[in-house]
Image (tube, rainbow, N blue to C red):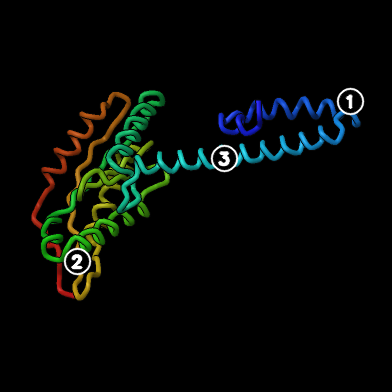
Amino acid sequence: MRFENLIAQDSLPQLCSVADRLRRIANDSPDALGPGGLRLLDDLLEAAAAAEQSIALQRARIRFLESLSVTDELTTLLNRRGFETELSRALARARRMDEKGLLLLCDLNHFKAVNDTYGHQAGDAMLRTVAKALRRSTRESDYVARVGGDEFAVIMTHTSITESEFLARKLSRLINGLSVPWQDTLLSVSASFGMANYDRRSQPETLIFLADQDLYRNKRPQLVSSGG
């Protein structure tokens, strides 16, 4: 089989096998290969290097495409699909390790009014500001996602009820204290939060429902902008 065919078939293991056989021949009989054999070995090594580079590029592209499938393009947070994946993993860990944690939902109040009054670019700026604040103010073990147009979620893993609720209140104060400079105006961020604790018995759909119900109870009118 020609080396080009091996590369085309992504058959690096076969290339390595051929290289091993040639090395053994060269070690046992240094003169056995001759000029033609040495050229063949050079070609083989070149082909193997090309195959390794090709495989590395393919794997990098696959990783990139996989990341796109679970990442929100605007905020670079997890998207809905990524959130559902990480929530399932968190609850699976909770069942295995008897862990506790918290699901926190965040919904921006009157976000449509921001888009209608100041334009979608202003709304996008607000979403990026909220996303950045949530990511910076959570732990590396937590997962932050944009699960809808103006809706965010935080999965706080391996956290006691007392600690998680303290962190949730801290995030609520932080987000509701944000202001987004936009042209000659400061857009004040207003958000409502809902939470639900989870343990080894929790199911994803029930957990989301409970957090969403808590969010609905906490919804209240808020101003969205103030003069700059």
Mark 3–mark 2 Cα distance, whole angstroms, equals: 49 Å
- Residue beneath the point at 21% across and 63% down: 122
Identify the amino acid type marked 3. Ser
Q: Nearer the viewer, residue 50 or 125?
A: 50
Pointer 1 residue: 28
Neighbours of disc 3 within 10 Å: few (<14), some (14-19), many (20+): some
Of the two numbered discs 1 and 2 on the same chain, state the one appearing first in sequence: 1
Pointer 2 residue: 187
Question: Going by the picture, which residue comes out furthest to the left?
Answer: 221
Neighbours of disc 1 within 10 Å: few (<14), some (14-19), many (20+): few
Q: Position of residue 12 (x, y in %)?
A: 62, 30
Helix, strand or loop at disc 1?
helix
Mark 1–mark 2 Cα distance, whole angstroms, equals: 77 Å
Q: Are marks 1 and 3 in contact (CB under 8 Å)?
A: no
103 above or below 118? Answer: above
Identify the amino acid type marked 1. Asp
Of the two numbered discs 1 and 3 on the same chain, state the one appearing first in sequence: 1
Identify the amino acid type marked 2. Leu
Q: Are marks 1 and 2 in contact (CB under 8 Å)?
A: no
- Residue beneath the point at 66% across and 40% down: 49
* Figure quadrant of the N terminus: top right
Mark 1–mark 3 Cα distance, whole angstroms, equals: 32 Å
Pointer 3 residue: 54
* Figure quadrant of the C terminus: bottom left
Foreground mark, 3 or 2? Answer: 3
Q: Position of residue 167 (x, y in %)?
A: 31, 48
